[in-house]
Image: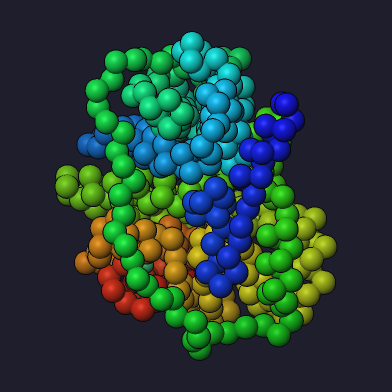
């Protein structure tokens, strides 16, 4: 019985990869792979901005998106026990850690492994406060999807502060509704052809096929160690809600350009770390290294890797090795999300893509340790789908 339930849940969480769009879909939602550095740093950026209630933004985004995502994974006829099991399994499957929801009905919730705690340990030091805002929002969304009840979930002990487990309490009697993940219908056709550069040495399809076939899901501890980082499959909706909300709040208090810079910097840091891990991984050695012929082939291979991670598809449209490149993104999740949530933006919107492009370029062509490469390239987004342009076009240039 238990294994039957387990395989029924597993079958609901199978990854579907849509090759033309480069989207990864799990249980009806687009997800993308990001590392623990990015997720923890994004959280720190959003929550530490004094003039913005970043914690509320983060908890609210997790609650809203996972109330919907868990609901999409439920089936008519699931018992209450199975419904909680689905919520618990989705969390670990996506790589967020091990969350015990078996006694959630009694208000007892514990986590024994956490993607976000690992992210804090990896580079942000011991925090002054508990860090599991994401888990709080997730469980609030889960409670709503599983039982229909409105609750607040509050962490009372956190591994990031040395506790053996993260522990959460449930506060009942909440009247504030769970926000619906409302989007506008979007009829957008990504550009299918362009003046895009390719390396004849790099078999893009082979790289994509191998990455899509690679099992990227949490083990018994719900973590996904790969490429020297912990990966998580995060719904694009979560990033979009957090980043759009953060930008709006920061603009409201006159700090819009700072917010844009911060969001780009976190993505750059993540790209440097993740792609350094990718390029020293057995997967890279086995699959990509034998393809490499010319000095720019690592760049073409790295960009192909990106296209398997769920961000959308991008292409190199111009290159002066070591100096600059032009990248076109035909359906990046940030731009598509902006159109769905906001309709349109007056200025280019894709700060994460900007940072990632600069980070990858610095990794391929920069010198010295990563800390010295950070910030050596600058990206301008010249056109953006969020503003109504046909593609997002990024110019990456060496600074100074
Ligand atoms: Zn915690
Ligand atoms: Zn854009």
Ligand 2 shows up in the quarter that is bottom left
The answer to whether 246 is drawn above or below residue 62 in the figure is below
Front-lying residue, 201 or 11: 11
In the picture, the quarter occupied by the N terminus is top right
The answer to whether 142 is drawn above or below residue 274 in the figure is above
Instruction: Residue at the far bottom: name it.
Output: 195
Q: Is residue 269 visible?
A: no
Front-lying residue, 148 or 58: 148
Left or right, 64 with reference to 236: left
Which quadrant of the figure has residue 130? top left
Color encoding of the figure = rainbow
Residue occupying the point 73% across, 54% down: 214
Residue occupying the point 63% across, 53% down: 15
Front-lying residue, 113 or 28: 28
Q: Residue 20, percent across and down?
A: 56, 72
Residue occupying the point 41% across, 46% down: 238
Q: Residue 394, percent across and down?
A: 42, 73
Q: Residue 60, percent across and down?
A: 34, 35
In the picture, the quarter occupied by the C terminus is bottom left
Left or right, 342 with reference to 35: left
Which quadrant of the figure has residue 2? top right
């Amino acid at each position: 019985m238990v294994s039957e339930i387990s395989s029924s849940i597993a079958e609901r969480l199978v990854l579907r990869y849509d090759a033309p769009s480069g989207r990864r879909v799990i249980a009806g939602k687009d997800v993308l792979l990001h590392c623990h550095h990015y997720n923890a740093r994004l959280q720190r950026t959003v929550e530490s901005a004094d003039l913005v209630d970043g914690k509320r933004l983060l908890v609210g985004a997790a609650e809203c998106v996972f109330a919907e995502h868990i609901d999409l994974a439920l089936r008519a006829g699931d018992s209450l026990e199975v419904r909680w099991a689905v919520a618990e399994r989705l969390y670990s499957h996506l790589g967020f850690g091990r969350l015990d929801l078996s006694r959630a009905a009694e208000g007892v919730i514990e986590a024994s492994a956490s993607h976000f705690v690992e992210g804090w340990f990896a580079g942000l030091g011991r925090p002054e406060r508990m860090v599991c805002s994401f888990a709080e929002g997730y469980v609030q969304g889960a409670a709503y999807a599983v039982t229909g009840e409105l609750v607040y979930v509050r962490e009372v002990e956190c591994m990031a502060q040395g506790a053996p487990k993260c522990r959460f309490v449930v506060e009942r009697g909440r009247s504030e509704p769970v926000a619906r993940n409302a989007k506008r219908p979007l009829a957008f056709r990504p550009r299918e052809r362009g003046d895009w550069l390719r390396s004849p040495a790099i078999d893009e399809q082979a790289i994509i096929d191998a990455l899509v076939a690679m099992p990227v899901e949490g083990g018994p501890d719900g973590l996904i160690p790969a490429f020297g980082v912990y990966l998580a499959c995060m719904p694009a909706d979560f990033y979009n809600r957090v980043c759009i909300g953060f930008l709006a709040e920061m603009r409201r208090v006159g700090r819009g350009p700072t917010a844009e810079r911060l969001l780009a910097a976190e993505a750059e840091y993540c790209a440097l770390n993740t792609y350094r891990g990718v390029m020293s991984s057995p997967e890279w050695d086995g699959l990509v290294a034998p393809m490499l012929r010319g000095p720019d082939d690592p760049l073409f291979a790295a960009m192909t890797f990106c296209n398997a991670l769920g961000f959308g598809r991008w292409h190199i449209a111009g290159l002066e090795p070591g100096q600059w490149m032009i990248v076109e993104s035909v359906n990046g999740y940030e731009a598509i999300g902006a159109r769905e949530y906001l309709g349109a933006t007056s200025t280019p919107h894709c700060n994460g893509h900007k940072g990632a492009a600069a980070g990858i370029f610095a990794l391929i062509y920069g010198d010295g340790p990563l800390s010295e490469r950070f910030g050596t390239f600058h990206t301008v987004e010249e056109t953006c789908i969020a503003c109504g342009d046909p593609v997002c076009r990024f110019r990456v240039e060496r600074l100074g």
